[in-house]
Image (tube, rainbow, N blue to C red):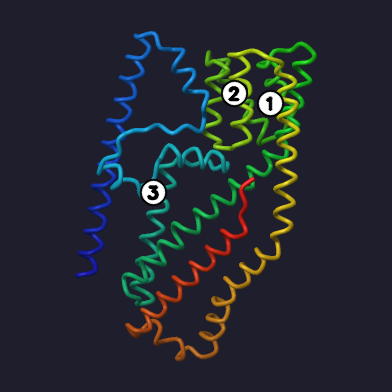
Amino acid sequence: MDNVTIFVSVLVVFSVLALLKAYYDMRKQMKMRIERIVTQRRGMAAKRTTQDVSLRRKTTEEKGLVYWLTKPLPDFKQLANRLERAGATMTAKQYVFRRAMWVLGIMFLTKSILGQPWWIAAAIGLVVGVWIPYKFLNMKIAKQNKAFLQLFPDAIDLIVRGLRSGLPVSESMIVVSQEIPDPVGSVFSNISNSMKLGVSLEKGLQEMARKLDMTEFNFFTTCIVLQRETGGNLAEILNNLSEVLRSRYIMRIKIKAMSSEARASAIIIGILPFFVFAVVSFLSPEYMSPLFNDPTGNLCLGIAGGMLGFGVWVMRRMTQFEI
């Protein structure tokens, strides 16, 4: 009964935090809407345009207790963007609901069938139901980003050729959406469709840049927005940008090749303890039973898992480079 009470209490706390987050988001959206209306009435459109050009600028807003309490909760808007980038068809709420059902189901099976303590069941449920799907989602996003970066310089070159032949930027983007395969073609198709609905080119590019959250596309958006405001040879600017993006992509591949040995070592060192643990458990189950049945063994298992996770994280960080 104590375990059930603890579980229900944790569930109630997270439900209250979710309600607080929804209330906080609603107040934040209402405040932003009021500020936008006031700004438009005061005729400050030029100032707002200058602020929108910087895609990496962070808004300085007051962060109270509610923000820090609800920060660990999922951001449905950002999660929806990540699911769309990964090519998933489900919504953010459906994804969170499925992850919660997986966690509860795995916790129930681990507690009732395997007879493990509730904290081990919760840890297994979080790893299998949340952490592994989240990593799989990140892998799909990384795969989409890699495919995007391979085709993006070709799309820019196609826009440059269209500009030099006399086509406007909007028409050149329509050509890109028709000639370049996905995922680049779908991105420019969404921008073209938004312009057909009356959205300006700058607004469509900025919204897509926030959704993709890629440095290369931010460069592209900033070049077009600044050129339309200040003037200049857009074809030459985009041509230089295409060369820079290709150089960045080649440098990223070289770094990945040079760090392949360190990454392979990290993978082997991270997998080896689990492999040895599985083999020893299969050959001599009694030898590993104190790790699960004895409190001291549980403490040692937790410390070993934490040290192993920290070591793998450090080795992973050592093999990642910013370009």
Work out how far the residue at label 1 is from the one at label 2, CA to CA, in angstroms.
9 Å
Classify 197 as above or below 321.
above
Nearest the camera: 95 or 71?
Answer: 71
Q: What type is the residue that disc 1 sits on?
A: Ser
- Given this view, does label 3 or label 2 mark the residue nearer the observer? 2
Q: Amino acid at mark 3?
A: Phe
Above-or-below relation of 94 to 279 = above
Looking at the image, which residue is at 52% across and 30% down? 55
Residue 245 point in image, percent of width and height: 71, 36
In primary-sequence order, the first of circles 1 and 3 is 3
Q: Amino acid at mark 2?
A: Ile
Toward which corner of the image does residue 94 lie, by quadrant? Answer: top left
Is the Cβ of the residue at disc 1 closer than 8 Å to that at disc 2?
A: yes
* Earlier sequence position, callout 1 versus callout 2: 1
Residue 106: horizontal and vertical position, in percent?
40, 64
Which residue is rendered at x = 44% and y = 34% of the image?
58
Residue at coordinates 69% horizontally, 42% vertically from top-left? 147
Q: Residues within 10 Å of mark 2 (few under 14, many from 20)?
A: many
Q: Which residue is mark 1?
A: 177
Q: Position of residue 52 (x, y in %)?
A: 49, 23
Residue 191, label in figure: 2
Please tell me how crowded label 3 is: few (under 14), some (14-19), or many (20+) other residues with Cα within 10 Å: few
Residue 259 tag number: none
Q: Residues within 10 Å of mark 1 (few under 14, many from 20)?
A: many
Residue 150 figure quarter: top right
> What is the secondary structure assignment of the residue under circle 3?
helix
The CA span between labels 3 and 2 is 31 Å
* Quadrant of residue 271 within the rendered picture: bottom right
